[in-house]
Image (tube, rainbow, N blue to C red):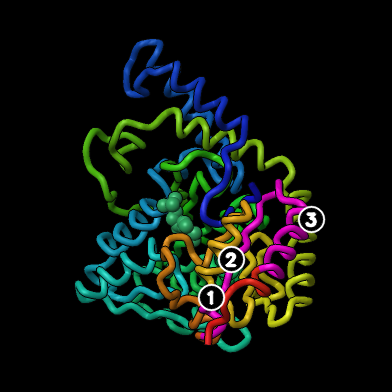
Amino acid sequence: MIYFDNAATTKPLDESIKALNAALLSFGNPSSLHKLGLDAEQLVNKARMQIASSIGALGDEIYFTSGATEADNTAIFGAARTLGKRKRKIVTTSVEHPAVSQPCRILEEQGFEIVRISPREDGFHADDIVGAVDDNTCLVTCMLCNNETGTILPISDAFKRIKKKYPTTLTHCDMVQGYLKLSVKAKSLHADMISLSGHKVHAPKGIGALYVRKGVHISPLLYGGGQERGFRSGTESVPLISAFGAAVEQLSKNTDERFDHVKQLSSYLRERVLELDGGGVNSPADGSPYVNSISIAHLRSEVMLHFLESKGICVSSGSACSKGKKSSVLSELHIRDEIADSTLRVSFSHENTIDEIDILIDALKEAQGTLIEVK
Ligand code: PLP
């Protein structure tokens, strides 16, 4: 099998599975005061430090969640509940993942003003994001890297200027698709909050984290036993947390080498796609090489996807979360409807190879000769 759907999820690393199994056997509750409990607490704290150091944060600034969806919801609803009595505006972008766009939509129904910044023809401009913020803005929430095209947004620049002009406005970044791929640290991002997901970085599903900068206080989403220093109640999933920490530690070691390898893959893929009759690349040249949006004119995405699947090649027709539904994100990114209908997302991990791309291109050529064209 050839797996090119790493923006949807990734294969857990051996080190991560090993840590998961070890923590399953050492099964204490981190809140218990006996030895098994303390062992479990140590595993959680070790992972907390592994995640913290991967983004240049302090251990106290990391809160474990069930994934990035929970981290995004916590940041957005938390900011709205904490500051939203006086500040009723949220600035975001028109290309966010539903884990951000849906909480914003719900707050809009509750009377918040949501300003969604769209990209210009040449991409996002920090000026547009900064210009939308005013004294009434409680939160600016923007992704770093788009999950459908790999477009990188000018968040560091925008957040830096926003924090300087409006220090009490909170900045939140959904960093899921950039984490351990682009070399970004919490400080250089000027984010008060950052969402991370384990299963996008070769850890299992069901674990993520929210970074909350020291000194920032927002209301929790979950109340109960007061775990995670009162910010996220619920017994910690020690095995998943341990597995997340182990994957992050492993991937923190050689980020640049992996980036260079994936950059090579991406350049090669883009070159080869353009050789195809009607082949096009939708992703910007300066986007993340990990996420590549391509299209083959006149062939429908789903038809191509199933043809490739029959050849043992896994790709996505867009964002996996949209399950084949038409993506408004692609049209926001100025990709015409007929092209969007013929789009595939090829998303890499460091384990992919040039040979696998050759097999994909051969399969696409075969698809062009076999499949019925769309009008
Ligand atoms: N944000 C982005 C940009 C994503 O790509 C995803 C997953 O596809 C999420 C958030 C949600 O992450 P999780 O599956 O950990 O809830």
260 with respect to 201 (left or right): right
x and y percentages locating residue 61 in the rendered image: 47, 44
| Residue at 21% across, 37% down | 224
Give the residue pinned by disc 3: 354
What residue did someone put label 1 on? 300
Front residue (pair 122, 156): 122
Crowdedness near tag 2: few (<14), some (14–19) or many (≥20) residues, C-alpha within 10 Å: many
Q: Which residue is drawn at 63% across and 71% down?
A: 370
Tell whether circle 3 marks a residue whose Cβ is less than 8 angstroms from ligand 1. Answer: no
The residue pinned by badge 2 equals 345
- The number of numbered badges drawn on the structure is 3
Q: Position of residue 358 (x, y in %)?
A: 77, 60
Give the residue displayed 59% in from the left and 73% down from the top: 371
Residue 75 percent location from the top left of the image: 37, 57
Residue 267 image point, x, y percent:
78, 67
- Image: 192 above or below 125: above
The amino acid type of the residue labelled 3 equals Ile
Tell me which segment is drawn in magenta.
Answer: 338-366
Q: Distance between the residues labelled 2 and 1?
A: 13 Å
Which of pointers 3 and 2 lies earlier in the amino acid sequence?
2
- Label 3 sits on a secondary structure element that is helix
Front residue of this view, candidates 41 and 131:
41
Q: Which of marks 2 and 1 is in front?
A: 1
Sequence-first disc among 2 and 1: 1
